[in-house]
Image (spheres, helix red, strand yellow):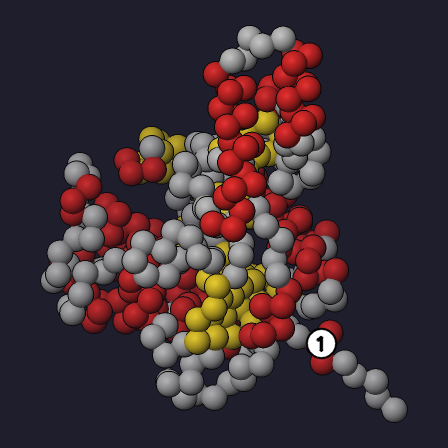
C-alpha cells in the first residue's frame, strides 16, 4: 500500500529578482520567516534568482549614491544558505546595460513618465529601474515556470521579512490548478501596504496560472504603456485583472544598498494601536538619551521591546528600526 498525503508533496518555487543590494542584511530574515516555515511543514521548495552584474548604484529617489554592489558575494551567501538547508538554487546573472541598450525608453512613454513629477535630475531614471526590474523578473520566471509548480513565491532579496510566511496561502494556491483559461487565472496573494493605487508589487504568492501573468508581465508592458502610464502598482493591478486576489499579512522593510532602512514602513491598521505605545516611548528614548540608564532599563522592560527576528529584549543603545518594528543592531541587523 502506498501511503500518500498530498499536503507534503506541494512543490513551491521561490523566485528572487532584481538587485541583491542588501542580501547580507536580509538573509537572516529570509531564513527565519520564509525558508524555515516551509521546512517546518515539510513543504518542498526550490529557489531561483536572477540579478544583474552591477558594481555601483546611484539612485536619487532612494538616497543611494555610488553605493557599492557585490552580486558575487551575495550569490555565494545565498548558495551557502541553500546548501545548508538542502535546497536547489538556480542562478542567472545578466548585464543591465545590455538590457537598457536593447530597449528604447521612448517606446514606453506614450502616456508620459509616471515619475515625471518627482524632479528627477536623470530623466526616466525610475521608469528605467522599473523596466530593469520587470526584465529581471521575466528572465528568471521563464526558467522557473517550466516546472509548473503549485505555488510561486515572488520575493525580493533587498527586503527584510518581518513576518512569518503563512503556510495556508501556499496550501490555497495548490487548489488552483493549471487550466490555461485567461478568465480563470488562479489566485494571487499580495500584502495590503504600499499599494499606491494598485497592488503591492514587492511580494506575492501565486498559483501557477497567475504566476505566469505576474512573472512575465514585462512582455506586455510596452503595449500597456501605449494605453496608460506605465506605473508599477497599477500596471500589476491591470495584469492580474482576471485573477482572484487575496491579502496576506507579511510586512517587509526595504534595505538600501548603503544599509539604510527605507522609511516607508508597512502599517496594518489592526496592530496600530498596540504599536502606538511602543512608538511613543521609542520617541521619548531617542530624544532623551541622557535619561539614567536604570530608568531606561525600567521603561524598556515595561514596554517589552523585542527584536522581530530573534525575539530578544531590546534596549535603545542596541536597536534599530522605526514605528514599532525593531531589530537588534549588532546581530539581526549586522
Ligand atoms: Zn535580533
Q: Is residue 215 above or below residue 305?
A: below
Report helix, strand or loop for mark 1.
helix
Q: Quadrant of residue 225?
A: bottom left
Expressed as whole percent of the image width and height from the top left, the position of residue 63 reads: 33, 33
Q: Residues within 10 Å of mark 1 (few under 14, many from 20)?
A: few
Name the image quarter holding the N terminus: bottom right
In-front residue for pair 140/191: 191
Name the image quarter holding the C terminus: top right
- Res. 99 visible in picture: no
In-front residue for pair 9/240: 240
- Residue visible at 18% across and 56% down in the picture: 105
- Res. 213 visible in picture: yes
56 sits left or right of 81 in the view: left
Expressed as whole percent of the image width and height from the top left, the position of residue 115 reads: 21, 48
Q: Is residue 112 above or below residue 329?
A: below
- Residue visible at 68% across and 58% down in the picture: 37
In-front residue for pair 202/106: 202
Going by the picture, which residue comes out furthest to the bottom?
Answer: 1
- Tell me the residue that label 1 is attached to: 7
Expressed as whole percent of the image width and height from the top left, the position of residue 272 reads: 50, 44
Amino acid at each position: 500500500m502506498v501511503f500518500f498525503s498530498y499536503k507534503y508533496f506541494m512543490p513551491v518555487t521561490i523566485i528572487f529578482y532584481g538587485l541583491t543590494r542588501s542580501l547580507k542584511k536580509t538573509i537572516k530574515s529570509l531564513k527565519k520567516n520564509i525558508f524555515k516555515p516551509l521546512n517546518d511543514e515539510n513543504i518542498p521548495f526550490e529557489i531561483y534568482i536572477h540579478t544583474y552584474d552591477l558594481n555601483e548604484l546611484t539612485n536619487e529617489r532612494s538616497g543611494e549614491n555610488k553605493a557599492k554592489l557585490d552580486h558575487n558575494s551575495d550569490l555565494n551567501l545565498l548558495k551557502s544558505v541553500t546548501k545548508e538547508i538542502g535546497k536547489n538554487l538556480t542562478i542567472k546573472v545578466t548585464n543591465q546595460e545590455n538590457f537598457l541598450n536593447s530597449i528604447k525608453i521612448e517606446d514606453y512613454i506614450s502616456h508620459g513618465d509616471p515619475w515625471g513629477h518627482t524632479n528627477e535630475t536623470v530623466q526616466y531614471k525610475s521608469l528605467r529601474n522599473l523596466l530593469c526590474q520587470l526584465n529581471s523578473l521575466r528572465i528568471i520566471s521563464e526558467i522557473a515556470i517550466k516546472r509548473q509548480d503549485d505555488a510561486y513565491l515572488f520575493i525580493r532579496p533587498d527586503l527584510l521579512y518581518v513576518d512569518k510566511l503563512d503556510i495556508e496561502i501556499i496550501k490555497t494556491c495548490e487548489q488552483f490548478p493549471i487550466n490555461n483559461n485567461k478568465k480563470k487565472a488562479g489566485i494571487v496573494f499580495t500584502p495590503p501596504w504600499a499599494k499606491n493605487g494598485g497592488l503591492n508589487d514587492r511580494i506575492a504568492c501565486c498559483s501557477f496560472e497567475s504566476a505566469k501573468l505576474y512573472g512575465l508581465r514585462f512582455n506586455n508592458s510596452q503595449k500597456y504603456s501605449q494605453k496608460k502610464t506605465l506605473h508599477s502598482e497599477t500596471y500589476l493591478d491591470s495584469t492580474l485583472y482576471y485573477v482572484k486576489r487575496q491579502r496576506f499579512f507579511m510586512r517587509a522593510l526595504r534595505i538600501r544598498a548603503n544599509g539604510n532602512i527605507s522609511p516607508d514602513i508597512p502599517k496594518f491598521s489592526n496592530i496600530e494601536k498596540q504599536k502606538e505605545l511602543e512608538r511613543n516611548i521609542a520617541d521619548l528614548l531617542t530624544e532623551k538619551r541622557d535619561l539614567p540608564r536604570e530608568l531606561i532599563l525600567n521603561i524598556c522592560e515595561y514596554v517589552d521591546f523585542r527584536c522581530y527576528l530573534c525575539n530578544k529584549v531590546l534596549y535603545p543603545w542596541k536597536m534599530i528600526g522605526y514605528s514599532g518594528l525593531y531589530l537588534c543592531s549588532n546581530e539581526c541587523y549586522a
